[in-house]
Image (cartoon, grey):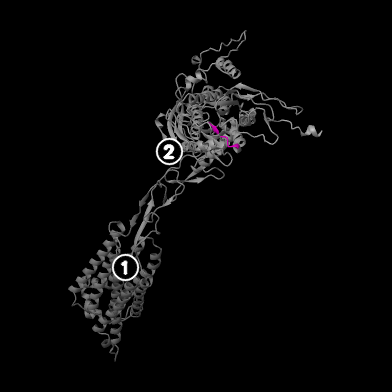
């Protein structure tokens, strides 16, 4: 037993599970791997867990996957035949069929990394060896690439995809060895949102594939759309393998929606399923916006027999031409291939024939001419994707060329390491033979540049993919989108850009008010309030006009407010001016009459000098009212109130002097009274001067401390500017009025006491009447002045000045003029000093 145990048996290293054989292979000095989906589905199987499950049986040959493989073979053959790139080094390949299955994709990726060979190893040596391939081309979709990159990432084997666009794959912490030759969906999703915004579509629907490609792409689109003010009415997802009722729900959502634009972030396979379902309901008239996965797919266009997608726009990979590739693909012959089984199935599917079989089905010869066949394989609409595969192979070749220090020959002694190759691929920068520049950024992504495609149906019913613009993410934001708007065809062959908004744009003069419980794109348009405007469409707020301006009727512009003041041109100002001048003229006429008859007793009575001074002051009172009319200025504001205050005090002082004279004259007739010597003409003049001087001092103090100044009142009227005189010091203003009122009351009291003096013509009666009118006018003036708006307050003040002036003039002087002119027989000393009993008022 010890002897048998001491004999070390030879240990065998082999990969667990069933062996995986490549569908296409060729030996070379350096091996490259490829993972493509030659089949689009597989046979369902019921695992009973009683025995090992059989291998996956793939069905439904996918000609597109075969095209991808042919593009890789073309690039490898071209490099092997080149004397400039990797001279003396031949590239081999192992290409597997992923069968559109993520699980199978991971399985074949491990087969590419480990190989299927059985290797002997000593008991001390581990079962480790270098990777079988130095880089892997593929897969086509994002979800399989995520799974494969996760598995092979720790081994640093470069995985270069030609069509996996999910932005999540740019995360180098999760997928350190993943690179791609197609831009990330981060740029495509943002570009789609900017495209939607460009055409003013703020209310759209969204449909996405329920996988990493669709969910991540739509998430970025939704985020960008919100930033640009675009709202999604609905956002739904599905997979082509979902039950029919789920797809029917999507159809119902589209039918019941109000948006006219649908953003479809779908794979071409899911788009084909959706088109078939929509065709049964004839849902035309919608404007489709598509991702690069289906927007330039001729197979999808061929399936759209009901013209549902006519006018669709979207982003596609820029058109490309790889010289010699089309001829290489069309030159494929099954009998010339080492992988007869794969090529045989391809050939039989392409020509609907069968090798080595007689009967009803046509027999394949293997020499059929592909150039005369019109199908998705011969129609090179996917040349931009083929070019991506071509560039991926060349990126690996250039990295190897650098590592092996190739010039005329390459250094075959260098031990290749996938990590070293990955590092060099990230740094390479070159141009292909057709002028395409190839490089990768820090995330393993190429430059983001898209063509904007518009589906334009032709007369024979075939869709023409017309390039109508370019989106280059490397340019500044204001010019990254370049469109030729005049060449668009929209849904239902319309030339007009379709409208898709939840609410119509709010015109200038209104603002947006969000509807409760609705997205921000759904709103009502509320008219701006008075004094506010909005001069742009879809304004969020209304802007208040400057205090000197007011909103027009449409609320879209501020117009200068009309300045309002009591002017000479308006009727009220003209009437007041005429009344003032009439009073002045009337006073002048009275003065002339008094001067003409100055020697008569009625004029000489009660100090004729005071009468002339009173007439002069009344003239000033009438004229000072003119300072209240017209546009206020600094001088007019100071002059109007001070002139009014001083002239009225002068006037009242004269009346007061005349009243005192009447009283003193009566007292002087009493026996033993000599009061007149204390109130003679000189004293009368001094009293008038003294009373007036007090008012002058009050006015000077007012003007010195805080004088009246012009003031623009914006509060009186909304749409007018009231230009008025601010009082400055309110104390000064009311002190002037109060002093006038004090003198008037004193004068009224004295005149009232003298009303029954025994003169035939008692002047005290008329003074009492005049003071009664004066006080009544100014007592009613105060509430009227305070409550009157704008220029009407000035008019009230002018009216009070004129009314009180006319009251004094008429009550004191008109009766005398009546006697002078019409009753001259009473203008005698005897009549004036009549001996009849005194008459009462």
Q: Secondary structure at mark 2?
A: loop
The C terminus - image quarter:
bottom left
Q: Please indicate whether residue 78 sits to the left or right of residue 732 in the image.
A: right
Mark 2 Cα within 10 Å, few/some/many (few <14, many 20+)?
Answer: some
Q: Position of residue 314 (x, y in %)?
A: 48, 31
Q: Is residue 158 magenta?
A: yes
Write down the residue under mark 1.
801
Which residue is the extreme one toward the top? 359
Q: From this viewpoint, is residue 469 visible?
A: yes
Residue 780 vs residue 85, the one in the foreground: 85
For residue 753, what is the image quadrant?
bottom left
Q: Which of the two discs, 1 and 2, labels the residue nearer the N terminus? A: 2
Write down the residue under mark 2.
480
Q: Do the residues under discs 1 and 2 have CB atoms within 8 angstroms?
A: no
Q: Is residue 196 above or below residue 680?
A: above
Q: Position of residue 184 (x, y in %)?
A: 52, 36
Q: Position of residue 670 (x, y in %)?
A: 30, 88
Query: What is the magenta range?
Result: 155-161
Q: Is residue 30 magenta?
A: no
């Amino acid at each position: 037993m010890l002897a048998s145990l001491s004999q070390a048996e030879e240990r065998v290293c082999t990969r667990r599970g069933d062996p995986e054989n490549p569908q296409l292979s060729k030996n070379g000095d350096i091996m490259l791997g490829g993972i493509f989906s030659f089949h689009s589905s597989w046979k369902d199987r019921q695992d009973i867990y009683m025995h090992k499950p059989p291998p996956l049986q793939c069905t439904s040959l996918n000609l597109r996957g075969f095209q991808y493989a042919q593009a890789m073979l073309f690039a490898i053959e071209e490099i092997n035949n080149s004397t400039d790139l990797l001279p003396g080094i031949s590239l081999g390949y192992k290409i597997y069929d992923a069968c559109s299955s993520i699980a199978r994709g991971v399985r074949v990726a491990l087969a590419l990394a480990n190989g299927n060979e059985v290797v002997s190893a000593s008991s001390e040596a581990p079962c480790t060896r270098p990777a079988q391939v130095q880089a892997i081309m593929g897969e086509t979709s994002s979800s399989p690439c995520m799974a494969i990159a996760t598995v092979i990432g720790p081994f640093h084997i470069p995985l270069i995809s030609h069509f996996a666009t999910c932005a999540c794959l740019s995360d180098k912490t999760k997928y350190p060895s993943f690179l791609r030759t197609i831009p990330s969906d981060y740029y495509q999703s943002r570009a789609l949102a900017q495209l939607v915004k460009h055409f003013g579509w703020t209310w759209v629907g969204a449909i996405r594939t329920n996988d990493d490609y669709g969910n991540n792409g739509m998430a970025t689109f939704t985020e960008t759309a919100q930033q640009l003010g675009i709202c999604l009415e609905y956002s739904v997802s599905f997979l082509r393998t979902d039950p029919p009722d789920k797809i029917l729900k999507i159809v119902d959502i589209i039918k019941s929606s109000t948006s006219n634009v649908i953003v479809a972030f779908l794979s071409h396979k899911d788009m084909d399923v959706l088109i078939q379902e929509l065709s049964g309901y004839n849902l035309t008239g919608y404007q489709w916006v598509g991702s690069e996965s289906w927007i330039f797919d001729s197979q999808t266009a061929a399936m759209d027999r009901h013209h549902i997608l006519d006018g669709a726009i979207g982003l596609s990979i820029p058109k490309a031409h790889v010289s010699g590739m089309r001829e290489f693909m069309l030159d494929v012959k099954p009998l010339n291939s080492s992988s007869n089984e794969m090529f045989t199935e391809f050939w039989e599917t392409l020509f609907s024939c069968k090798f080595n079989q007689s009967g009803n089905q046509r027999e394949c010869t293997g020499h059929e001419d592909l150039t005369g066949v019109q199908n998705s394989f011969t129609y090179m609409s996917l040349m931009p994707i083929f070019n991506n595969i071509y560039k991926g192979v060349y990126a690996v070749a250039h990295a190897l060329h650098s590592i092996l220090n190739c010039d005329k020959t390459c250094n075959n002694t260098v031990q290749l390491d996938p990590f070293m190759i990955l590092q060099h691929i990230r740094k390479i920068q070159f141009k292909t033979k057709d002028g395409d520049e190839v490089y990768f950024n820090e995330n393993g992504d190429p430059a983001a540049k898209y063509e904007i495609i518009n589906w334009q149906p032709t007369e024979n019913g075939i869709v023409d993919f017309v390039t109508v613009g370019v989106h280059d993410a490397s340019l500044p934001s204001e010019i990254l989108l370049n469109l030729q708007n005049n060449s668009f065809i929209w849904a239902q062959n319309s030339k007009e850009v379709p409208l898709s908004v939840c609410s119509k744009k709010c015109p200038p003069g209104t603002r947006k008010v969000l509807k409760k419980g609705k997205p921000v794109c759904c709103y009502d348009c509320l008219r701006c309030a008075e004094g506010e405007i909005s001069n742009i469409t879809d304004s969020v707020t209304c802007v208040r006009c400057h205090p000197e301006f007011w909103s027009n009727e449409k609320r879209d512009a501020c117009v200068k407010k009309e300045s309002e003041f009591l002017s000479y041109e308006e009727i009220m100002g003209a009437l007041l001016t005429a009344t003032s001048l009439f009073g002045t003229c009337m006073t002048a006429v009275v003065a002339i009459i008094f001067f003409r008859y100055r020697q008569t007793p009625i004029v000489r009575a009660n100090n004729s000098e005071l009468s002339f001074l009173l007439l002069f002051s009344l003239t000033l009172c009438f004229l000072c009212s003119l300072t209240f009319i017209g546009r206020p200025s600094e001088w007019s504001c100071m002059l109007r109130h001070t002139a009014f205050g001083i002239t009225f005090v002068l006037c009242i002082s004269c009346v007061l002097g005349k009243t005192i004279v009447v009283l003193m004259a009566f007292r002087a007739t009493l026996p033993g009274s000599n009061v007149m010597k204390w109130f003679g003409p000189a004293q009368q003049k001094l009293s008038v001067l003294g009373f007036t001087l007090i008012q002058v001092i009050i006015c000077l103090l007012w003007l010195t401390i805080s004088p009246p100044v012009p003031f623009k009142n914006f509060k009186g009227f909304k749409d007018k500017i009231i230009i008025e005189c601010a009082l400055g010091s309110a104390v000064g203003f009311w002190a002037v009025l109060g002093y006038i009122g004090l003198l008037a009351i004193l004068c009224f009291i004295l005149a009232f006491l003298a009303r029954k003096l025994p003169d035939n013509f008692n002047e005290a009666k008329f003074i009492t009447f005049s003071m009664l009118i004066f006080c009544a006018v100014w007592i009613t003036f105060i509430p009227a002045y305070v409550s009157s708006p704008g220029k009407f307050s000035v008019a009230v003040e002018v009216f009070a000045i004129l009314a009180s002036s006319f009251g004094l003039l008429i009550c004191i002087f008109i009766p005398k003029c009546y006697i002078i002119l019409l009753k001259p027989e009473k203008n005698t000393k005897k009549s004036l000093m009549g001996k009849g009993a005194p008459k009462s008022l």
